[in-house]
Amino acid sequence: SAVISQKPSRDICQRGTSLTIQCQVDSQVTMMFWYRQQPGQSLTLIATANQGSEATYESGFVIDKFPISRPNLTFSTLTVSNMSPEDSSIYLCSVDAGITSGANVLTFGAGSRLTVL
Amino acid sequence: AQKITQTQPGMFVQEKEAVTLDCTYDTSDQSYGLFWYKQPSSGEMIFLIYQGSYDEQNATEGRYSLNFQKARKSANLVISASQLGDSAMYFCAMRERNTGNQFYFGTGTSLTVIP
């Protein structure tokens, strides 16, 4: 299955700043997914990043706050803009790993743990 | 309504014992898949096991098995012979054919293995 490298693994940020998270996959994939996991919570899909087109955002997430780039089939970035303490979360990049155990399984990066002061 | 419900926020199990983590789901789709992921304190999500809605037999992967009861819409994870390294958050998830790429995750169960 795909191997995903995500960075930074963690960061402490100041309120009002922006941070870009990078996601690199070791194989070409059509879609990449960005999830947010707030402290003690489950995973929520932010957006789906398609190469060559605008990302598709889920309800409650907007491009101005979470701009996404997808310049090629192995790389994507997520920016968290104008951060506030409420943005303190783990941000996870994921891809469809292909068929594993008979299903399309999501493979995840190690996550980026952001703390906003 | 919640797509995935995990009613056990925290569970404890003695090392070498078996433990069952509960998961119920809600869907009107006939074709769907159920997944379990493990999230250690490091934060990475690790795929454990999958069960398809049309699978006749319960899925097994090493010490993990999935107790699939379709009529009850439950997909409980059974971990046998618990090890200290099993201490982690466990998430149940579902993917429906009708909603394409969307994965629905439960709120998770924190498992602590006691030596």
Image (cartoon, coloured by chain):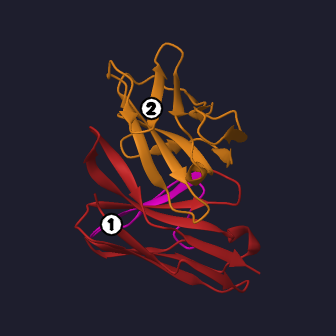
Chain colours: A red, B orange
The numbered mark at residue B86 is: none
Q: Which mark is residue A3?
A: 1
Q: Is mark 1 on a helix, strand or loop?
A: loop
- Give left or right: position of B64 versus A17: left
What amino acid is found at the position of numbered circle 2 in the picture?
Answer: Ser
Residue type, mark 1 in image: Val
Residue A50 magenta: yes
Quadrant of image for the N terminus of chain A: bottom left
| Residue A83 percent location from the top left of the image | 67, 78
What residue is pinned by disc 2?
A: B65
Residue placed at 68% from the left, 83% from the top? Answer: A12
Residue A72, position in %: x, y?
Answer: 26, 75
Which residues, given as a range, are shown in magenta? A43-64
Answer with left or right where residue B28 lies relative to residue A103: right
Dot 1: chain letter: A
**Crowding near pointer 2: few (<14 within 10 Å), some, many (20+)?**
many
Of helix, strand and loop, which one carries label 2? strand
